[in-house]
């Protein structure tokens, strides 16, 4: 038995591969490129009567874009006529290998959620929420022009399923990407292009104003990265 155990231990290195290299924020957030753009969204309360659901419905416009500062990158969202929030920031915490979404209300208060992405579903648990309540925010990336987000809660330490509090369904407005830069991708983020920028007489494509400004700040960097990616 001791010999068998020794043989088993000696094979662990080949059985379990080394963990992947840590991703940069820009790389880790690329699955959310589909969110970049403007969305028309309708929200409604859950687990209420039809009358309460109809009375509680609201319409908002959600606009996502990339932001950069040095080597750091994150996604910003702005909610126009949002019922609960006015803005938010989606970041990647490389040391924890988790995503973090911080949402801001009109009164300048904020709530923070952290979690992971699995099969196009981002499940985020609230950090430092009410001591007796557990909250979860779930974002489902359904299609290139459709996504949902919902808030759920349950008593702390409960084994019962989460109760849905509200859900918001969003559809991309205008879909301007359809006829802009077909066959190309954003040179900064890799997302679907929506606008063109020109450098030294050559055209390149970006997905949002944030990526446009980032490209302009150091075009040679992104041109070199794109060339290396194409070669690979």
Image: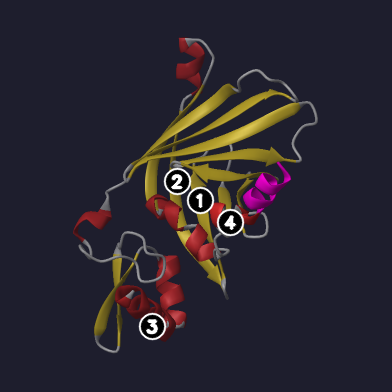
Magenta region, main secondary structure: helix
| In the displayed structure image, the side of residue 63 where residue 182 appears, left or right | left
* C-alpha separation, residue under disc 1 versus residue under disc 3: 32 Å
Label 4 secondary element = strand
Residue tagged by mark 3? Answer: 224
Question: How busy is the neighbourhood of tag 3: few (under 14 within 10 Å), some, or many (20 plus)?
Answer: few
Q: Please provide percent x and percent y for residue 83.
A: 54, 35
Residue 126 seen in the current view: yes
- Of marks 1 and 3, the one in the foreground: 3
The reply to whether residue 107 is in sight is no
The mark that comes first in sequence, 2 or 1, is 2
Magenta stretch encompasses residue 210: no
Dot 1, crowdedness within 10 Å: few (<14), some or many (≥20)?
some
Distance of mark 3 from mark 4, alpha carbons? 25 Å
In the picture of the structure, the residue carrying the numbered disc 4 is 91
- Of badges 3 and 4, the one in the foreground is 3
N-term mark: 1 or 3: 1
Which of disc 3 and disc 2 is earlier in sequence? Answer: 2
Q: Residue at x 53, y 36 (%)?
A: 138
Determine if the magenta segment contains residue 5: yes
Query: What span is in magenta?
Result: 1-9
Number of numbered labels in the structure image = 4
Mark 2–mark 1 contact, CB under 8 Å? yes
Name the residue carrying label 1: 78
Q: Front-most of 92 and 44?
A: 92
State which quarter of the image contains the C terminus: bottom left
């Amino acid at each position: 038995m001791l010999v068998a155990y020794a043989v088993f231990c000696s094979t662990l290195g080949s059985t379990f591969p080394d963990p992947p290299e840590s991703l940069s924020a820009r790389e880790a957030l690329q699955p959310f490129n589909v969110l970049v753009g403007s969305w028309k969204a309708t929200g409604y309360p859950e687990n209420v009567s039809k009358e309460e659901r109809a009375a509680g419905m609201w319409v908002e416009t959600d606009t996502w874009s990339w932001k950069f500062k040095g080597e750091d990158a994150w996604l910003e969202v702005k909610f126009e006529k949002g019922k609960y929030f006015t803005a938010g920031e989606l970041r990647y915490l490389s040391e924890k290998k988790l995503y973090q979404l911080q949402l801001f209300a009109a009164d300048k208060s904020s709530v923070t959620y952290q979690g992971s992405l699995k099969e196009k579903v981002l499940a985020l648990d609230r950090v430092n929420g009410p001591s007796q309540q557990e909250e979860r925010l779930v974002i489902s990336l359904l299609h290139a022009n459709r996504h949902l987000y919902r808030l759920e809660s349950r008593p702390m330490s409960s084994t019962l399923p989460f109760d849905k509090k509200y859900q918001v369904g969003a559809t991309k407005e205008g879909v301007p990407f359809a006829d802009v830069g077909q066959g190309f991708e954003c040179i900064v983020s890799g997302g679907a292009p929506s606008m063109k920028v020109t450098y030294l007489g050559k055209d390149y494509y970006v997905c949002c104003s944030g990526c446009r400004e980032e490209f302009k700040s150091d075009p040679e960097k992104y041109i070199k990265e794109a060339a290396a990616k194409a070669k690979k």
